[in-house]
Image: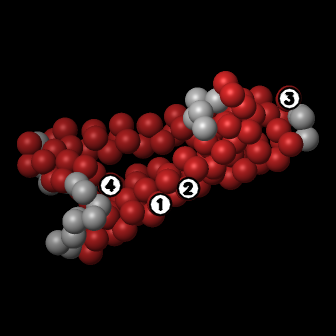
Amino acid sequence: MELDLEKVMILLHRKWNSIREIERLTQELDETFGRNDGISAVMLLQLRADEMEKVEHCMEEIWQLGEGSREAYDKLHELIESDLGQAVGKSPEERKIFEIRRKTQKLLDELKVADQRLNQKMAGKKSFYKK
């Protein structure tokens, strides 16, 4: 069974959209903490958790696409796990998959910085990210 590259692209794009939403919610959370609005903060944390669950679900669906055959799994593993610095797609679909992965990684890197800053701001010396 051949790997459905279009479905992989769709799921990776869905994952990227969820991570963008997590980033937006993180910014909103920062503003909410600045206003000392605990009720809204709890709600935003739950919304973030829901989006994180969507990201996990997308990845589960992606890996399920590789369950049809060993060849499909190997191809999927190459597309999802390969080093983005060296990854070059052989087809337009593969190139798009790597492009989405690069955009996602960039967004994740930015989100980690924002999350670290927010965590340090709120937790101070008890922060997970100690200065």
What separation in Å lies between label 4 and label 3 (alpha carbons)? 38 Å
Q: Position of residue 130 (x, y in %)?
A: 59, 33
Q: Secondary structure at mark 3?
A: helix
Colour scheme shown: secondary structure
Q: At 22% from the left edge and 65% from the top edge, which residue is drawn?
A: 86
Q: At 69% from the left edge and 42% from the top edge, which residue is drawn?
A: 118
Q: Which residue is mark 1?
A: 106
What separation in Å lies between label 1 and label 3 (alpha carbons)? 31 Å
Instruction: Decide which of tag 1 and tag 3 comes sooner along the chain.
Output: 3
Q: Is residue 5 left or right of residue 120?
A: left
Q: At 58% from the left edge and 29% from the top edge, which residue is drawn?
A: 128
Label 2 packing within 10 angstroms: few (<14), some (14-19), many (20+): few
Q: Amino acid at mark 1?
A: Lys
Label 4 packing within 10 angstroms: few (<14), some (14-19), many (20+): many
What separation in Å lies between label 3 and label 2 (alpha carbons)? 26 Å
Q: Position of residue 100 (x, y in %)?
A: 40, 63
Q: Position of residue 63 (x, y in %)?
A: 28, 41
